[in-house]
Amino acid sequence: MGIACVVRPVETSADLSKFIALPYELYKDQRHWIPPLRVDQATVLNPKKNAFFEHGKIQPFLATDESGAVVGRIAGVVNGMHLQKYDDGTGFFGFFECVEDYDVAKALFDAVAEWLKSEGLKAARGPANPSLNDVSGLLVDGFDRPPAILMPYNFPYYADFLERYGFERIMTMWAYYIHFKYRKLERMRRGVEIIKRRNPDLELRTIDMDRFDEEARMILDIYNDAWSENWGHVPMTNNEFAHLVKEMKMIVDPRIIFVLEKAGEPIAFSIMLPDVNPWFAEIRDGRLFPFGLARILKHKLLTRISEGRVVMMGVRKEYQGRGFDAILNLASLEIPVPYGYNAAEMSWVLDSNKAMMNAAEGLGGVKDKEYAMYELAL
């Protein structure tokens, strides 16, 4: 017999606080889970602070047991940019967490399905928190190591709950781990030399922090063009990207963010971020104050960040298929080494992107984590 629970929409600030607080209780003994900052979670869910709400909706739900204790949460998501691009009646769910009890999960799925139907939608896809441009996907394999920066972590039983309810996996995504000690670069170096000889007007540079906002707008423009035909891609609005850039600016290492120019025109980019998750692992309650910030600073002083994550890469469509991505891949695995980096994660890589999977494996990458997106017809 499962837990008897009541699912209700989040309507008050007290409800929202409980919604945000649940994962810190559920994962308190899970050492591989990296606690997000509560203030960041509150920002994501705040219509006044998150540019996603300019075109989308998020409706959080709480599940409580007979004693009033919170035993689960989920959110229904309407992504206006997705509907504008695809016009497919697809809604989303995200922020799913629950105790190990299928009855609780079922009640949450029922609630989000009914809400999405009330919004006139025909399918529920996720997890997206709240979009594929944010932390998204369900971890289905690779629970033995912490996630890289801006990647999700969840309990193994979530996949079973989704599939029991009727959700079907519609996409698999991979996280490739490459330890620089085991890189295989010779073949790529030879290929890059050939590409450079054929294109003498190519120039690789790092981003200019003195023109950070201008550089960010350029990257957004290339990203929206380069990714426009990728599975699930939804263009980021200027304000959404500005919010993302504001968050990233605090942790970026400009020495490992690359722009490829052809005849002076930016045509491609790659972004590698230092994996600062070990710092945040120290703040188990997700609170910067009164002690969280001190823990981060202490850990920062004692622990050197030695790994990065290639979070984004793009080549303008008109230049794709010419090997220019190899220049960026090679730079991401060679240039960071003198700066103390010894490994990188490339994630996520769509299972449908065989070219990128082959490139990652050819460079010495191994599939370290498996993620999935699920969908349910309503």
Image (cartoon, rainbow, N blue to C red):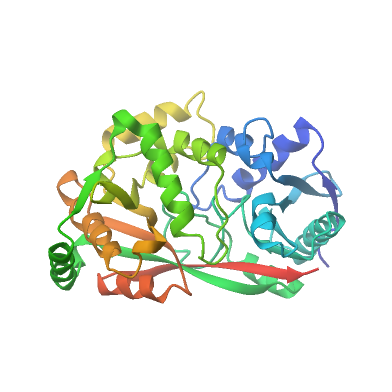
At which x and y percent is residue 35?
52, 44
**In the image, what residue occupies the spot 14% across and 47% down?**
338
Where is residue 9, by image quadrant? top right
At which x and y percent is residue 119?
83, 54
**In the image, what residue occupies the spot 40% across and 39% down?**
216
Task: Please state, as top left, top right, bottom left or bottom right, where the N terminus lies in the image.
Answer: bottom right
Where is residue 86, by image quadrant? bottom right
Q: In this view, does 26 lie to the left or right of 332?
A: right
Residue 258 visible from this viewpoint = no
The relative height of residue 233 versus residue 42 in the rendered view (above or below) is below
- Nearest to the observer: residue 225 or residue 80: 225
Task: Please state, as top left, top right, bottom left or bottom right, where the C terminus lies in the image.
Answer: bottom right
At which x and y percent is residue 14?
76, 32
Task: Count all numbered tags in the image, as a single digit.
Answer: 0
- Nearest to the observer: residue 25 or residue 150: 150
**In the image, what residue occupies the spot 49% across and 40% down?**
244
Residue 344 visible from this viewpoint = yes
The relative height of residue 310 versus residue 14 in the rendered view (above or below) is below
Q: Is residue 326 left or right of residue 316?
A: left
Q: Which residue lies furthest to the top in this view?
A: 290
The relative height of residue 228 versus residue 204 in the rendered view (above or below) is below
**In the image, what residue occupies the spot 82% across and 60% down?**
107
Q: In this view, does 206 lie to the left or right of 295?
A: left
